[in-house]
Amino acid sequence: MDFWHGFAVLTVVHLLAAASPGPDFAYVTRQSLVRGRRAGLLASLGIALGLSIHIVYSAAGLAAVIAHSAQWMMAIKLVGAGYLLYLGYKGLRSGAGSVAAIDPTPALPAAAWRQIGGGFLCNAFNPKAPIYFLALFTVVLSPGLPLSTLIVYGAWIMLLQWLWFSLVALVFAHPRVRDRLLAARHWIDRAFGAAMIALGLRVLVTARD
């Protein structure tokens, strides 16, 4: 597969994967609705940066090792499920009174790093990532590719991820969308929490298989 053919396949496959509902989508949506556009964009940046973890270990051939090791897959699923359950617990703790705590002002540096870090961890702890990147590297990003090509492909994947979730953030942070939904902010938090817990429990169930 030549460079541009691989580039095109990679673009289509990863956009479809990024657009599929999952923890990243739920996280960016919540941050955009609750904390505003900047928070959503920072969370999107963190999610894109989180891909670097998966790209590096996949390029090193570890994705195949992890995917074919019951012990490694169990450990990754348990860690990923634990983080999803933690996010879910935080969401379910939201109460109606927390609406007044929304701060429309730009995030301070410390808060900005928290948004980036939250997105990074959400993506890095995604328990489905090793399987996805194993398939991706099998089809396009084989470890035998030149390092320069791997770097370009990896950077492109991260850029696609950031662009997609930035679009999601801009849509949900739009004043008309946000103003209509913020009245039910605590229900949004709880829906987010329930979704994260459902995903975490689903991962735990599959970890036993």
Image (cartoon, rainbow, N blue to C red):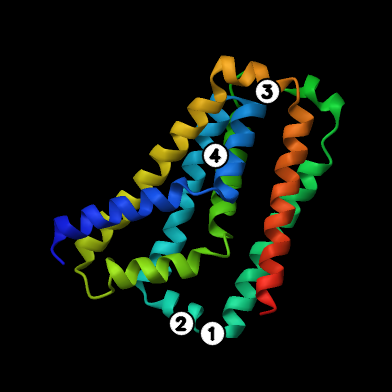
Q: Position of residue 120 (x, y in %)?
A: 54, 50
Please state if 80 lies on the left or on the right of 40 as rendered. right
Mark 4 lies on residue: 43
Question: Contact, CB < 8 Å: mark 4 with mark 2?
Answer: no
Question: Contact, CB < 8 Å: mark 3 with mark 1?
Answer: no
Mark 1 lies on residue: 69
**Label 2 vs label 1: CA separation?**
6 Å
193 shown above or below 62: above
| Nearer-N-terminus badge (4/1) | 4
| Residue kind at label 2, given as amino acid type | Val
Quadrant occupied by the N terminus: bottom left
Helix, strand or loop status at disc 4 = helix
| Nearer-N-terminus badge (3/2) | 2
- Neighbour tally class for label 2: few under 14, some 14-19, many 20 plus, Cα within 10 Å: some
Q: Nearer the viewer, mark 3 or mark 2?
A: 3
Which dot marks residue 10? none
| Residue kind at label 1, given as amino acid type | Ser
**Label 3 vs label 2: CA separation?**
44 Å
